[in-house]
Amino acid sequence: MKASADLLVVGGGTAGLVSARTAAGLGARVLLVERGRTGGDCLWTGCVPSKSLLAAAAAAAGARDATRLGVHAERVRIDFPAVMDHVHSAIDHIEPTDSPASLRRAGVRVETGEFCFTGTASGTVAGRPIRFDQAIIATGSAPLVPKLPGLSGLDYLTSDTLWDLRALPPRMAVLGGGNIGCELGQAFARLGSQVTIIEATGRLLPREDPAASALVEDALARDGARVLTGTGVTGVIPTDAAGSAGGRLVLQDGTTVGFSHLLVAVGRSPRSAHLGLDAAGVECDQRGHVRVDAQLRTTTARIWAAGDITGHPQFTHLAGAHASLAASNAVLGLRRRIDPTMPRVTFTQPEVAAVGVSTAGPPDGVRLRSWSLTEVDRAVTDATTAGFTTIATDAKGRVLGATVVGPRAGEALAELTLAVRHRMRIRDLAGTTHPYPTYADAGWNAAIADVRASLTRPPLSTIVRTASTARRHWVHARARLSSPLGGLNGLPPRKR
């Protein structure tokens, strides 16, 4: 059978869409297979709806907190169905960009149905056989649901299913204090739900700088959320009604937390089952992630993988970067490798953004320089001074990593991400003129402070003092020679 495509792309989320468009743009015959709707988690259940919900929640919180600026909103009323209408209107606005029609205009053939490999160059789509020369697996991930006693009998929510809500949950328990749990927990608290977030580790956002975690926990408390850390959940007691959304969580110490709705946000698992990967010789790790090398090639030479399915950090921007790399490697025979520089942002208020070497307990030889938002003029004028920027450098002043906490932290991190990727020196940041006043001033001032501090350390301090002293003597000597009384041969002073 003649190959149906030069490149088969399995999955129509971010990684699949970018893979298909990239390959088609390079002249390949591309077939994309999606079991449901194109757009993936980012469009339908992830980035777009969650940030739309966060925008509504931020507007409510901003109105309530406007008294700090002398503005008094007598009463903030939440129209939750209208909030969800806003969420779905954002999805509807963006959806055409990710639609099958858009893909076809880009030269991609699209088929709908479940795909299963039957060999290293063959498979089936809804039972129909197809052949391909190469393939990219981009099936993404799904919310992870823990095996808790009683959970299966509950109508719980995940980041996939909560977008169908039309009434605000009166009491929401959030299982998991990572980025998804913190973002959505804060959003619902600001919209008026009584929220309790339970995190098994000792703090929220356990992979971030502890100082950042503390600021987020403080913000959640101000928004009315209850945070329980360092305690696990041993079971769920649903209400008596079958299929009810309400119940109680049983904690390790035997206490319980009641809820009308439970949001499970403990992580995500790869969508690799039922793909027939064994038939294609594609190996997975114990969690089901497809094994790939630094060029995103799987254990089968003609098959590649991109995005969440690979076990790399689960970010939309990484999925897109993976997709471009995998597609160009497959179609052009290149040997491009994964860029290790990977920024991340948690879109709470304050935002938490980080890249590169951790600023919490960095390795030996790494120097940290921090700047608080209390010393940033834009933050002072906005009365939003909870936050900081910390930059990590090596002994030569090269930027290795950064953490930014505060409003627009994700935007401020972009410059620092570029610095990490290109091993720029912190003096390069300090010597670049930045617009004023912005929240990025925190990073700039941290860089300036680091450069100034370096001038006080030997041997540079000795060189600077020597140069300063020599310059002072030279200026004084020239002034004497140029004065009317001290000029040579009584001549008038020279014009400058």
Image (cartoon, rainbow, N blue to C red):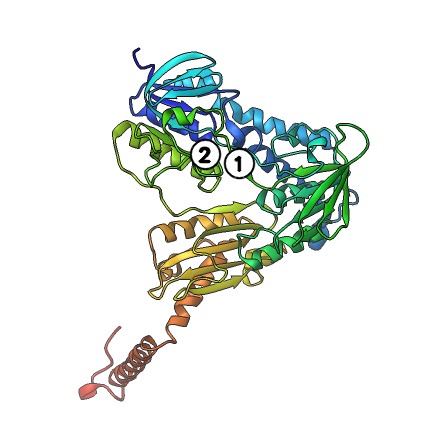
Q: CB of mark 1 within 8 Å of CB of mark 2?
A: no
Q: Would you place residue 125 above or below residue 217 in this image?
A: above
Please give left or right for residue 229 compared with residue 324 in the image: right
Q: Would you place residue 342 above or below residue 306 in this image?
A: below
Quadrant the C terminus occupies: bottom left
User: Which mark is on residue 309?
Assistant: 2
Question: How many neighbours does mark 1 have within 10 angstroms: few (below 14), some (14-19), or many (20 or more)?
Answer: some
* Element assignment for label 2: helix
Provide residue 283's location: percent of width, then percent of height. Answer: 39, 33
**Residue 490 or residue 488, whichever sits in front:** 488
Question: How many neighbours does mark 2 have within 10 angstroms: few (below 14), some (14-19), or many (20 or more)?
Answer: many
Q: Residue at x 55, y 63 (%)?
A: 375
**Residue 345 or residue 257, whichever sits in front:** 257
Please give left or right for residue 424 compared with residue 438 in the image: left
Residue farthest along the left direction in this orientation: 489
Provide residue 178's location: percent of width, then percent of height. Answer: 59, 46
Is residue 381 visible in this depiction of the protein? no
The amino acid sitting under disc 2 is Ile
Provide residue 296's location: percent of width, then percent of height. Answer: 35, 36
User: Which mark is on residue 269?
Assistant: 1
Q: Residue at x 53, y 52 (%)?
A: 207
Q: Which image quadrant is residue 459 in?
A: bottom left
Provide residue 141's location: percent of width, then percent of height. Answer: 51, 33
Q: Would you place residue 35 above or below residue 316 in this image?
A: above
Please give left or right for residue 73 compared with residue 270 in the image: right
The amino acid sitting under disc 1 is Ser
* Element assignment for label 1: strand
